[in-house]
Structure formats: C-alpha cells, structure tokens
Amino acid sequence: MNLSDSFFNRVEKKTNVSKSSILSLAKKLQGDNMKNEANLKEVINDICKMTGKEITKEQENKIINTIINDKVPNDIDKMI
C-alpha cells in the first residue's frame, strides 16, 4: 500500500467517502477551477451531501475565501 492509498483509507474511514468520489471531486478542481467561486460552491455542496454534513453560508464563504486566497495549509494530510 502506498502513501496515497493510506491517505485515502484514512479519509474514507473517517468520512465514508470513497477514493473514487474524492478523485471525482479533485477533477472538478483542476486548473483555474480552484479560483472559480461557483465551482467551489458546487464542490462544497457535493462534499456536504457525501458526508451528510451541513454548513452555514458563513462557513461556506470562509472555505471559499481560504481557497481563493491560497490560505490552505500545506500539511493538510496531518488534519485527517
């Protein structure tokens, strides 16, 4: 098992979201899509549906602003 499989296994164990679902979401975020607010909202909505979690508009806006302004931590793997 390589590092990426280990990462996906931990994510799936904690969230019940499969590797294929994660990779599908990642494809939506390739290239300039990371700076597209409408696309980010769609991905956030998809994640909420997959995980059964709800977030407020304030939380959604905070996530979007964090991504658009390149404030995502480099060690995100440690958060999972």
Image (spheres, rainbow, N blue to C red):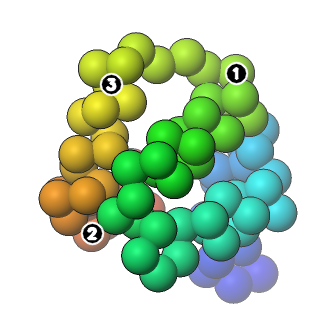
- What quarter of the picture does the N terminus occupy? bottom right
Query: Which corner quadrant of the image does residue 19 belong to?
Result: bottom right
Q: Which mark is residue 52?
A: 1
- Judged by depth in the image, the label closer to the viewer, 3 or 1, is 3
**Could you tell me if residue 48 is visible in this image?**
yes
- Judged by depth in the image, the label closer to the viewer, 2 or 3, is 3
Residue at 60 percent of width and 20 percent of height? 53
Residue at 32 percent of width and 44 percent of height? 64
Name the amino acid type tagged 1: Gly
Dot 3 or dot 1, earlier in sequence: 1
Name the amino acid type tagged 2: Asn
Marks 2/3 in contact by CB < 8 Å: the verdict is no
Q: Which mark is residue 8?
A: none
Q: CA distance from mark 1 to mark 2?
A: 26 Å
Viewer-closest of 76 and 34? 34
Image coords of residue 24 (percent x, y): 74, 64
Q: Which mark is residue 74?
A: 2
Count neighbours of disc 2 (C-alpha within 10 A) and say few if under 14, some if 14 to 19, many if 20 or more.
Answer: few
In this picture, residue 22 sits left or right of residue 3: right
Q: CA distance from mark 2 to mark 3?
A: 20 Å
Q: Which residue is mark 3?
A: 59
In this picture, residue 74 sits left or right of residue 50: left
Count neighbours of disc 3 (C-alpha within 10 A) and say few if under 14, some if 14 to 19, many if 20 or more.
Answer: few
Image coords of residue 21 (percent x, y): 78, 55
**SS at mark 3?**
helix
- Judged by depth in the image, the label closer to the viewer, 1 or 2, is 1
**Could you tell me if residue 8 is visible in this image?**
no
Name the amino acid type tagged 3: Gln
Q: CA distance from mark 3 to mark 1?
A: 16 Å
